[in-house]
Each structure stands twice: as C-alpha cells, then as structure tokens.
Amino acid sequence: MTKLAESYFRLNIALTEKDRGVLREFLQEQALESARELYGQEVEIVCFIEEGSTTAKWIVIGSLSFILSQYGSIRTGIDYAIDDARRFSDFAKEELAEIGVQPQQILVSRKRLGIPGKVKRVLERMEKLEETGNSMSAAEYEQEMQLIKKQLSLIANDIDTEQDYQSVVPMLEANFQEKLPSRAPEDQEQDQRKAARPKKPTIPKPRYRVAAKSQAASPVEEKYDLVIENGTHKLSKRSE
C-alpha cells in the first residue's frame, strides 16, 4: 500500500501522556471511518500525537492502483487522488475543532499530498519540457532530463507494492517518452546534442515492503472535549 495523504498540525496545547494516548486512539478511529468513505477502499491510518508543542499527524495508506483504475488517464486519476488528499486534510482540521481546539491554537498546518503529489509534479515537469525543450540549449535540456529522471526514481522507490508500481511507473515512463520534444534543442554542436539526449530513462525497481493488513475499527462511541483544568489542558469525555 502507498502513502496517499498526510496531514500535520502543530498545536499550542499541552497534554499528559495518558491524554495524548486517548486523543491518538480517538482521532485515528475517526479518521479511519472518514478515509474509508472518502477513498472507497480499505485503507490504513497512522496517527501520531507527540509531546512538547503538541503535534498531530495523520498518514493515509492505501492502493493507488485502485484509484487510477477508475479513470481513463493517469493524470485524471492523480488529480482526483490529490483532491481526496486535500479533503482528508480538511476533515482532520474539523476533527480538531470538534474536540475544542481553537484556530489560534493551531500554530502550523500542512497538507501533504503523498505519492499522488509527487506524480503530479513530475507530470507537470514533463509538460513544461514538451513546451520549452526546443528553445533550450543542450546543457539546459540535459539538466532538465536528469531532474525528471531523478523524480521518477524517487517515486519508484517510495511505492510499496508491486501492483501500485506497475500501475504508476510504466505509465510515467511511457509519458516521459511522449512528452519529449520532437527535436533536440538548437545548438552549434549537433553531434554533442544528440549524444546528450537520453533515449530512455532507466528507473530502478524498488524492493517492496510488505504492508500490514488494516485492522477493522470498532464504531466510535465516545466523544471528547478539550478543557482547561487548573491551568492544564485535559481531555474530558463528553456526556451525551
């Protein structure tokens, strides 16, 4: 399974170790229910609640090949996956508000788009090369090619499963070839230009990690509120 989204918040609250554990379990269960509905598949949620200026982080892990199989092109599928990642991050922020975290207590908020974000960035780079490659010098062209190859290699190494790898990397390789300009950049040294132009990127195949199976979450029965007691933040179970 592959990282589909990540949400990160640094909060200006202080919790005891016990309350951090309660909050982590609660937020993880809530997020799992929402992510299953949002992505339409079985996913895993990893939730971290760390001390100090409390940080809350959610990571959504699922099948990227499942998402891409529902659309006609890799670009369309990736755009939808990114939209889902952004919606998940909005959900995470709403969950913090639900327990009583105030906007001014959120010091840092970040939406991270996981592998779909990396794929979109490299696709955009290919499109830019297609548009501007003919106007580049041989050195500029070669530099851009190497940057794209590096991005492709990083994506290949970050994908965890064979199925996701086969759904993403071969398509990117094919897209890479299609996006190349029809001719190399104009340069006085034509032979050097041809030699500098790679024929096909070589992308290493990663060692796949075996993803753990998702644990079915029991329905969330309890709700919590963030309260201040004797000058300290505490989680209080809500009575409904």
Image (spheres, rainbow, N blue to C red):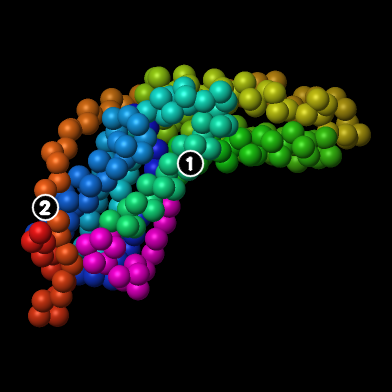
Say which quarter of the image contains residue 207.
Answer: top left
Label 2 residue SS: loop
Depth check, mark 2 against mark 1: the one in front is 2
The one nearer the camera, 142 or 164, is: 164
Residues at marks 2 and 1, CA–CA distance in whole angstroms: 31 Å
Estimate the x, y position of residue 125 in percent, counting from the top left: 65, 39
Mark number displayed over residue 222: 2
The stretch of residues the image draws in magenta is: 96-112
Magenta stretch: includes residue 100:
yes
Q: Characterize the local packing of mark 2: few (<14), some (14-19) or many (20 or more) Cα atoms within 10 angstroms.
A: few
Mark number displayed over residue 8: none
Q: Decide if residue 101 is in sight here.
A: yes
Q: Decide if residue 152 is in sight here.
A: no
Kind of residue at disc 1: Ile
Residue in view at x 31 percent, y 40 percent: 35
Judging by the rendered image, the residue that carries numbered circle 1 is: 82
Residue 221 located left or right of residue 171: left
Estimate the x, y position of residue 222 in percent, counting from the top left: 11, 52
Estimate the x, y position of residue 192 in percent, counting from the top left: 82, 28
Label whose residue precedes the other's in the sequence (2 or 1): 1
Q: In which quarter of the image is the C terminus?
A: bottom left
Estimate the x, y position of residue 239 in percent, counting from the top left: 8, 61
Q: Do the residues labelled 2 and 1 touch (CB within 8 Å)?
A: no
Residue in view at x 23 percent, y 58 percent: 50
Q: Characterize the local packing of mark 1: few (<14), some (14-19) or many (20 or more) Cα atoms within 10 angstroms.
A: many
Residue in view at x 83 percent, y 26 percent: 183
Say which quarter of the image contains residue 98.
Answer: bottom left
Say which quarter of the image contains residue 225.
Answer: bottom left
Kind of residue at disc 2: Glu
